[in-house]
Image: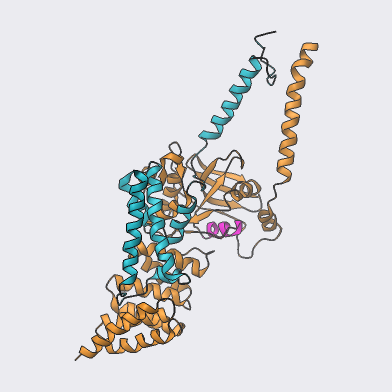
Amino acid sequence: MKRIKQAVVTVSCACLLGAGFLMPAQAALIGSDQIVRSDSAARSRIDGWLARDEVRSALAAQGVEPAQLQARVAALSDDEARDLAARIDQLPAGGDGGDILGILFAVFIILLITDILGLTKVFPFTRPIHR
Amino acid sequence: MTSTTGRTTPASAGVLFWACCCAAYLSGCATPQVDSLLRERPSGLPASQSIQVPFFPQREHQCGPAALAMVLDAAGDTVAPQDLIGSVFVPAREGSLPPEMLAAARRHGRLAMTLPRRVDAVLAEVADGTPVVVLQNLGLSWLPLWHYSVVVGYDLDRRFIVLQSGGQGATPMSLRTFELTWARSQYWAMVAPSPDRLPVSAQPLQMFAAAAALERIDPGSARRAYRSMTLRDPGLPEAWIGLGNTAYQQGDLQESASAFTKATELDPASADAWNNLATALTALGRACEGAAAARRALQIGGAHLAQYQQTAADIDSACAQAP
């Protein structure tokens, strides 16, 4: 169901955008962001739009509050939005040191147990339960 | 006696094994940037520097918001880390993603941008009084510990850099260790100065892109950034176009038209500049002057030709109706 919904949203966004490009452009300024990406022109405009949409759903899926999504995504440049959309799961997330201590503690406990079971002998202070 | 040897041998073997692994691992770790920096110091870079940056202790996993609050407050904001959690934190990742750090700084009207991926670029910003947020992996590539810190000082003679983060107040770290831990993020560093104060190490077109990203959500701050850019490098047509665009958005048509005029003088082949000058002149009620500029854009053409054609058509009819 969610997939169908997503597909409908994506297709209708694409249609709306397509319609926008078929209509005559308004007499107006060439925007600064258009100048930044002037090489690839209209194609990347669509990409930026869809990329923001993808980032929005990805962040929502990762627990970001819905009320924050719009403002967070709006403040990204097109390049940043595309980068996030392409590799949000590979990008490092700066947090803190809880994880490494947890892993080391887990390794310590596992080796301690295997020592006690007599499968290993890593720590000098352990005695196996079966002699 | 036998029991003693029985106890120590495997432990010693283990220590030896890990020592070998470490040696093998470390021998593959070079610090080319710091080595060349210490061998030959860049001219103009002071031997040491230290800047005062407010310190915020961090809550669990919140080094991103803490680092961001420190750089924002260093330049006069009063933002607390907890006010920034909603802007950058990703709960499922228990951390903050680099592009969102830039976006969050922009929401506070800052000219946020990444720096060139070089140690000397980071030190140059610090020497200029701008704190730099860096992303480091304090663990290993296969056991990562991603952490944001703020660079607040360095000392080349004593070979250390001073880092401050949510976990710790200003603390020195050897430059070599810094390069090793920073390299794992592909040397990701950002600054978030106020738009009146441009980063010293950034290329003009990078700065233009950063200002254009700011313009999406805060044209007023972006206008200040473009103005600073025209003051530093008056020969950059893009900066004048950005200044014209933001002045136009804020209703200052006079400044807008004169900025676009400047851009056309600097780069007469910029169709975008001519198109925007035509639009600004028409908004000022000078449609017939605008028509001439619009024709220049049409002659030059380019990726935005459809928009130039529309501008020219609209302006020609406005000029025909003019008294």
Q: Quadrant of residue A125?
A: top right
Instruction: Indicate yes or no whether the magenta region holds residue B166.
Output: no
What is the residue that sits farthest to the left in this orientation? B323
> What residue appears at the point 41 percent right and 82 percent down from the top-left corner?
B262
Count the marks: how many? 0
| Bounds of the magenta segment | B117-128
Tell me where residue A93 appears, x and y as whole percent: 49, 45
Q: Quadrant of residue B284?
A: bottom left
Q: Quadrant of residue B238?
A: bottom left
> What residue appears at the point 61 percent right and 40 percent down from the top-left corner?
B142
- Where A66 falls versus A13 (above or below)? above
Which chain: cyan? A
Which chain: orange? B
Tell me where residue B183 appears, x and y as whole percent: 61, 50
What is the residue that sits farthest to the top in this orientation? A131
- Where A2 falls versus B44 (above or below)? above
Left or right of B248 in this view: A131: right
> What residue appears at the point 39 percent right and 84 percent down from the top-left corner?
B297
Instruction: Indicate yes or no whether the magenta region holds residue B119.
Output: yes
In the picture, which quadrant includes the C terminus of chain B?
bottom left
> Closer to the camera, A5 or B133?
A5
- Where B79 falls versus B315 (above or below)? above
What is the residue that sits farthest to the right in this orientation? B1
Tell me where residue B144 appears, x and y as whole percent: 57, 40
Left or right of A21 in this view: B36: right
